[in-house]
């Protein structure tokens, strides 16, 4: 039973991550994000439908949260990001490993422990990767709509049409799951709060810290997981 609950929580959080990033909430994205086969994802989503957590539209192939599913997703996301804060500031775990470890903690932390961590850390508003942390009892979640100055790096560059300087607001969950890539971002100075210079270069994006010469080449899907503001 605990393993099954963990799988459902993983799916709920993955769908919320798509919503947070402004992506269509589709089963194929769950499959890619969690590295599970299409039939496995379909079977699990059907179970979530039966349990009243999500609905699935056969017309546009998109998922939607029920109120119960949405609250469950927010609860897991809050636990995950508060665990990241604790692992980073109290445990001192390397920044590149914090996300992976928090993925384990999010399934075993009680609500009581979650709120004690929140209190002990002074109610942090952002994770170590810059992501907003849902408040307890939140009724909506749309960080991009609430922060219209923030957009993913690909959209930012297409709108600019040339090389631009920007500030890293937060790093998407898909990138956080790649410790080696996180290390490369840190080496290039592309961390939350840093100013970077980015430019389109064919099928990739060239990125470097505005204060150094460290250069990083990112593929477009990866660059779209970096969220920036002017």
Image: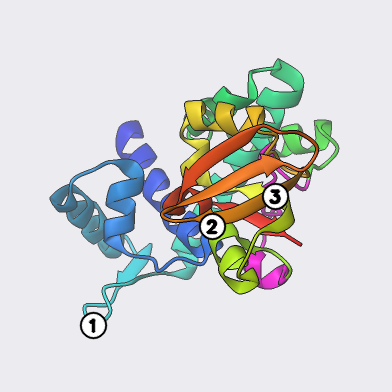
- Return the x and y of residue 200 as percentages of the image width and height: 54, 57
Decide: is 95 above or below 23.
Answer: above
Q: Residues within 10 Å of mark 1 (few under 14, many from 20)?
A: few
Give the number of the mark in front: 2 or 1: 2
Q: Which mark is on residue 59?
A: 1
Magenta stretch holds residue 157: no
Mark 2 residue element: strand
Residue marked by disc 2: 200
* Mark 3 Cα-neighbour bin, 10 Å: few <14, some 14–19, many ≥20: some
Question: Can you say whether 6 is above or below 90 in the image?
Answer: below
The answer to whether residue 127 is magenta is: yes
Residue at (60, 64) in percent of width and height: 157
State the predominant SS element of the stretch in magenta: loop
Secondary structure beneath dot 1 equals loop
Q: Secondary structure at mark 3?
A: strand
The region drawn magenta spans 125-148
Give the Cα distance between marks 2 and 1.
35 Å
| Residue under the image location 71 percent in, 72 percent down | 148
How crowded is the residue under tag 2: few (<14 C-alpha within 10 Å), some, or many (20+)? many
Answer with mark 2 or mark 1, whichever residue precedes in sequence.
1
Q: Residue at x 81, y 42 (%)?
A: 123
Q: Position of residue 126 (x, y in %)?
A: 73, 45
Q: Is residue 85 left or right of residue 204?
A: right
Q: How is the image coloured?
A: rainbow
């Amino acid at each position: 039973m605990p393993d099954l609950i963990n799988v459902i929580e993983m799916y709920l959080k993955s769908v919320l991550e798509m919503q947070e990033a402004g992506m269509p909430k589709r089963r194929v994205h769950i499959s890619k994000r969690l590295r599970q086969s299409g039939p496995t994802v379909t079977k699990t989503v059907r179970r979530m439908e039966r349990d009243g957590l999500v609905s699935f539209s056969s017309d546009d192939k998109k998922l939607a949260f029920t109120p119960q599913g949405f609250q469950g997703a927010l609860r897991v996301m809050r636990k995950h990001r508060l665990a990241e804060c604790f692992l980073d500031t109290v445990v001192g775990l390397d920044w590149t490993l914090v996300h992976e470890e928090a993925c384990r903690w999010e399934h075993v932390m009680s609500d009581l422990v979650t709120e004690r961590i929140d209190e002990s850390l002074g109610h942090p508003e952002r994770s170590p990767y810059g992501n907003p942390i849902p408040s307890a009892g939140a009724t909506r979640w749309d960080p991009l709509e609430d922060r219209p100055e923030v957009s993913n790096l690909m959209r930012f560059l297409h709108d600019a049409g040339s090389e631009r300087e920007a500030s890293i607001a937060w790093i998407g969950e898909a990138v956080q799951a790649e410790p080696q890539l996180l290390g490369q971002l840190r080496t290039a100075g592309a961390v939350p709060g840093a100013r970077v210079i980015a430019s389109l270069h064919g099928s990739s994006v060239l990125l470097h810290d505005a204060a150094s010469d460290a250069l990083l080449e990112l593929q477009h899907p990866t660059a779209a997981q970096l969220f920036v503001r002017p």
